[in-house]
């Protein structure tokens, strides 16, 4: 009898944890905001990720590294379209480099050498990458005007920037994202 | 028959009954969110004597981890569950079984940030302290203890750490690492400087490790406490920037430096000029006996307290990554220069869309090492090791890399990246004695062709020319991707230049077996074929591959591990939530 009760209680506990986690996720997806992690500007100064904002307009935060080829393809594709994207939606792109001390000194000249015009910050020991749950770059996050993470995508193939822009436009217009893509 | 229930069992039972009901009624714990990420890499091993792939007893291995992180306002907590069943072949031996090793709690209050448990931290460039992790490399030297971070005045941050370091599935309690770091941004701290164009940051750290020396049987005393100091600066003025860091470590005889009693030092310098469309960098580094670990008997990548960055470009194309440089903590003198330039559109070299060029040169030599006296060879244990003139480097060249990368968009549907690399590689020092010095040239042409706006074909043609090691290789890779979800790829790496027999390869799977034997037998020319496909949906990524992988070396940031030859299925699944 005691054994049966124990077994049922254990199963209920597990069920409730799963329910809680799923419920959390639904709530969390709407509320998850950017964590507060110190990053470095290209001047070497500290900037905290909780201060990232764009006056209520959408932001793209994407992780990259100078040695990550698909990341460079993604940022080139964004750069080609950035002026148009900004005109239409006011989006702000923040590229966070996970280059460590071996390659971090070449980030600023590299960015200038490619002619990229968006903000670039350094996360040399991967603190922001870990907090954001990034496995490997490229990993892009779309943040809405309230600072909530509403969409993510890993990897990059030519043409992915089109899907990214569709999502940016929806967020800029205040429309909901298609549920299969919501994260 | 049943014993009367003890109080503890009754208590646990009561908790189990009440717990579900508490959960169901409290949707959020405090004000926070839970999120995390997951990755599993599984590999099936088919023995293949032609390429030197050994049989693996369990036939299939898997490395996996899941991170869970809870954050709310000023509090956060997290843990990582890891499973190595068994660890992937080539992964550091010692990663085995399952468990939660990384777990922490952290809070912020009145400007003080406290973390207890496992944490990662870097002081400056990391040359006296850097704890970090790289799952692909099997590297994790996190500290388990306490970390404090505090900003007493604007622009000043002070950090303090103390703890034991992780080694594979345990924390090494025989070594205690403690450190303190201060960094000051003068433009933030000094009111008059806020609007100055020149931005100056200075920092300094002190790290010390303690490992008992009682019971050591050496004829000299091995210091139980080893301290290291460092100072750094970073100056940016518009388009110019210059930064440097210098470190000094007291005598620290250990396994890696052959137990010499010499102190260590390191100096790093980076200078750059950049403006839109142009970037120029210069870096120099001198390392003299700076291997720094929690345990004086550790080797490989175990229990490293610091991180000495290698000064060379990270090459990622398969054939260009055969001969990667690994930092030499016992002594190296490195230089690197790089130029980035955009030839603008509508100029002769720019063409219609512009052309990017990246020219990079790096070299590493041994430092000057002179014997202490006529009867003591350089590096003799329990002596001061050697004398070194800091401004000289020795004639022994470890590594030299000259490379050029040209990126060009030719039309709205076609672009290419062309890379040329000229390498000199002292494998005896960088990998192991017997490897030899390799002189090689590598050419890579990567092309992208857009069939439609969402369908792209990417192709890589690579060639490696060398008369040493395994001699010439050619490779072709084709990848077809359908944005944003699918890709499929196939490649063939062909070692057509080899002069080593099949029998010779089959007896010894270590790297030295790939050298010419004195008789120089006629070739067994091997194809390494690989096919893979993958699917990505938001943060979920899945990829499945099948084929042969060459024995080699995989490096991230100058830290390396060997990759044994393998043949079989590879599966990777990753996700974030």
Image: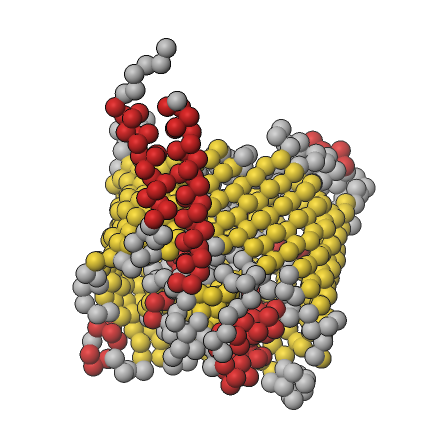
**Measuring 62% from the left and 28% from the top, which residue is drawn there?**
B57
Residue B565 at x, y percent in the picture: 66, 41
The x and y percentages for residue B186 are 24, 73
Query: Would you say residue B328 is visible in this rendering?
Result: no
Q: Residue furthest bottom?
A: B346
Q: Position of residue A108 (x, y in %)?
A: 45, 72
Residue drawn 71% across the image and 56% down it: B489
Q: Residue at position x 41%, y 58% from top?
A: A28
Closest to the observer, B433 or B403: B403
| Quarter holding residue B125 | bottom left
- In the displayed structure, A119 sits above or below B220; it is below
Is B512 positioned to the left or the right of A128 in the image? Answer: right
Q: Dividing the image into 4 quarters, which one contains the N terminus of chain B?
A: top left
The residue under the point 33% across, 50% down is B26
Q: Quadrant of residue B450?
A: bottom right
**Total tally of numbered discs in the picture:** 0
Colouring of the image: secondary structure
Whether residue A178 is visible? yes
**Does residue A141 appear left or right of residue B14 in this picture?**
right
């Amino acid at each position: 009898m005691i054994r049966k009760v124990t077994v049922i209680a254990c199963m209920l506990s597990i069920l409730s944890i799963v329910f809680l986690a799923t419920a959390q996720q639904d709530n969390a997806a709407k509320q998850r905001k950017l964590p507060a992690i110190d990053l470095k500007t290209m001047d070497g100064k500290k900037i905290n990720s909780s201060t990232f904002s764009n006056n209520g307009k959408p932001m793209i935060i994407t992780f990259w590294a100078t040695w990550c080829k698909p990341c460079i393809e993604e940022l080139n594709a964004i750069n080609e379209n950035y002026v148009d994207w900004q005109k239409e939606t006011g989006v702000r792109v923040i590229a966070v480099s996970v280059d460590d001390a071996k390659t971090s000194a070449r980030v600023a000249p590299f960015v200038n050498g490619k002619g990229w015009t968006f903000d670039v910050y350094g996360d040399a020991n991967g603190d922001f990458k870990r907090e954001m749950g990034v496995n490997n770059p490229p990993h892009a996050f779309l943040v809405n005007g309230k600072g909530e993470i509403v969409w993510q995508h890993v990897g990059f193939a030519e043409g992915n920037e089109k899907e990214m822009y569709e999502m940016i436009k929806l967020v800029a217009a205040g429309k909901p994202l298609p549920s299969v893509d919501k994260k | 028959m049943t014993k009367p229930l003890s109080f503890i069992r009754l208590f646990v039972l009561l908790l189990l009954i009440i717990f579900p009901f508490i959960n169901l009624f409290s949707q959020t714990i405090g004000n926070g969110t839970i999120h995390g990420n997951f990755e599993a890499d599984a590999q099936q091993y088919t023995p293949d004597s032609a390429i030197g792939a050994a049989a693996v007893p369990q036939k299939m291995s898997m490395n996996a981890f899941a991170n869970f992180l809870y954050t709310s306002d000023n509090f956060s907590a997290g843990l990582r569950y890891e499973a190595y069943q068994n660890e992937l072949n080539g992964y550091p031996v010692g990663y085995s079984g399952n468990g939660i090793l990384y777990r922490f709690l952290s809070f912020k209050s009145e400007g003080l940030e406290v973390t207890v448990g496992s944490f990662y931290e870097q002081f400056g460039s990391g040359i006296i302290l850097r704890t970090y992790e790289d799952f692909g490399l099997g590297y994790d030297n996190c500290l388990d203890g306490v970390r404090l971070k505090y900003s007493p005045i604007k622009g000043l941050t002070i950090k303090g750490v103390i703890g034991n370091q992780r080694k594979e599935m345990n924390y090494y309690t025989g070594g205690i690492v403690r450190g303190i770091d201060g960094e000051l941004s003068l433009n933030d701290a000094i009111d008059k400087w806020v609007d100055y164009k020149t931005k100056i940051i200075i920092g300094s750290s002190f790290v010390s490790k303690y490992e008992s020396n009682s019971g050591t049987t050496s004829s000299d005393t091995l210091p139980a406490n080893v301290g290291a100091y460092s100072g750094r600066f970073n100056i940016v003025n518009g388009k110019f920037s210059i930064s440097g860091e210098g470190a000094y470590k007291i005598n620290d005889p250990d396994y890696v430096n052959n137990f010499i009693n010499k102190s260590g030092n390191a100096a790093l310098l980076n200078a750059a000029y950049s403006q839109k469309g142009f970037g120029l960098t210069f870096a120099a580094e001198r390392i003299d006996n700076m291997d720094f670990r929690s345990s004086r008997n550790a080797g490989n990548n175990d229990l490293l307290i610091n991180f000495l960055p290698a000064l060379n470009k990270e090459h990622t194309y398969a054939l260009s990554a055969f001969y990667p440089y690994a930092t030499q903590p016992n002594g190296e003198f490195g230089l690197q220069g790089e130029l980035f330039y955009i030839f603008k559109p509508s100029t002769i070299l720019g063409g219609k869309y512009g052309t990017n060029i990246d020219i990079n040169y790096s070299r590493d030599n041994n430092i000057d090492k002179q014997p202490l006296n006529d009867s003591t060879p350089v590096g003799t244990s329990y002596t001061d090791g050697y004398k070194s003139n800091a401004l000289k480097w020795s004639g022994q060249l470890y590594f030299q890399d000259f490379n050029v990368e040209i990126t060009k968009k030719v039309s709205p549907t076609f672009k290419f990246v062309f890379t040329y690399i000229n390498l000199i590689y002292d494998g005896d020092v960088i990998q192991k004695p017997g490897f030899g010095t390799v002189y090689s040239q590598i050419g890579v042409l990567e092309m992208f062709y857009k069939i439609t706006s969402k369908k792209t074909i990417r192709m890589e043609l690579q060639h490696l020319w060398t008369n040493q090691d395994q001699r010439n290789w050619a490779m072709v890779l084709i990848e077809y991707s359908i944005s944003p979800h699918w890709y499929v790829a196939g490649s063939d790496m062909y070692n057509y230049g080899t002069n080593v027999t099949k029998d010779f390869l089959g007896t010894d799977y270590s790297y030295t077996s790939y050298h010419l034997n004195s008789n120089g037998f006629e070739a067994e020319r091997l194809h390494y074929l690989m096919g893979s496909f993958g699917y990505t949906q938001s943060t979920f990524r899945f990829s499945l591959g099948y084929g042969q992988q060459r024995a080699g070396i995989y490096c991230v940031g100058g830290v390396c591990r060997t990759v044994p030859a393998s043949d079989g299925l590879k599966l990777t699944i990753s996700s974030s939530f």
